[in-house]
Image (cartoon, grey):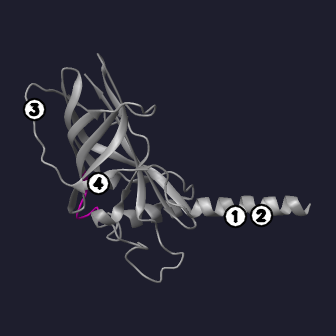
Amino acid sequence: MTKFRKLLGLVVIAGFIASCGGPQGEKAKTGEAQEVSVKSGEITINVDLQTSNVEWVGTKPTGKHNGTISLSSGELMLTDGSIVGGKFMIDMNSIVNLDLTDEESNGKLVGHLKSEDFFEVESYPTSVFEITSVAVLEGNADATHNITGNLTMKDVTKSITFPAMVTISDSGVSASSPAFIIDRVQWNVKYGSKSLFANLKDNFINDEISLSINLNAGI
């Protein structure tokens, strides 16, 4: 019985540590914004706004929240059957939380995310991701390409690179990324940041947020 209690205690502690950790995923390579060069001869196709979105996960010591953000427009550019560019407008007013079932709690969280503490959607209603390069990725079962582009969120634009599974057929293009991580503070989303504010104790929110991008476009 004593051994069982010790084992149970270790399991509880391990679960607590896991819940206190940051979001899951590979860190996206982040740097200064890159020049966008438009190549000639592209075929431009529009993204299906009903089946394309951005999934997000945010974490804190007491747990995590997750949800989606919709696109307001988007297009991909193809040359010789390969993606060579694209631009996507992300509707920050469409932020949705999926884990809180209580309507009041859900509304408070979404309202807080839209407020000046976080994404300031009244001043910055749209975020933008514009592809600058796409490179074939080998040796990764979860991804076929590395996608690099400029992410503009609030008043900051930075380059990010993340892996994605890209499928191109006669009927269209689909691209989905495994969860990847960015540091929200780099885009001036500072509320509850342990790296910026002292004496938060366990009331901080992790600087790192997890994103997954899902795109579908028909030819």
Q: Position of residue 65 (x, y in %)?
A: 50, 57
Which residue bears the numbered disc 3?
Answer: 39
> Which label belongs to residue 13?
1
Q: How far apart are marks 4 and 2 (CA)?
A: 39 Å
Secondary structure mostly seen in the magenta stretch: loop
Mark 4 vs 1, N-terminal side: 1
Q: Distance between the residues labelled 3 and 1?
A: 54 Å
Mark 4 vs 3, N-terminal side: 4
Residue contact at pointers 2 and 1, CB within 8 angstroms? yes
Which residue bears the numbered disc 4?
Answer: 30
Q: Distance between the residues labelled 2 and 3?
A: 59 Å
Q: Distance between the residues labelled 4 and 1?
A: 33 Å
Q: Picture quarter containing residue 54?
A: top left
Which residue bears the numbered disc 2?
Answer: 9
**15 left or right of 172?**
right
For the residue marked with disc 4, what is the amino acid? Thr
Q: Picture quarter containing residue 78?
A: top left
Q: What element carries label 1?
A: helix
**Disc 2 residue crowd, few under 14, some 14–19, many 20+, Cα 10 Å:** few
Q: Is mark 4 on a helix, strand or loop?
A: strand
**Disc 3 residue crowd, few under 14, some 14–19, many 20+, Cα 10 Å:** few
For the residue marked with disc 3, what is the amino acid? Lys
Q: Position of residue 216 (x, y in %)?
A: 33, 31
Residue contact at pointers 4 and 1, CB within 8 angstroms? no
Decide if residue 186 is in sight here: yes
Residue sticking out furthest to the bottom: 199
Q: Position of residue 200 (x, y in %)?
A: 48, 80
Decide if residue 52 is in sight here: no
For the residue marked with disc 2, what is the amino acid? Gly
Residue contact at pointers 4 and 2, CB within 8 angstroms? no
The question of residue 139 being in magenta is answered with: no
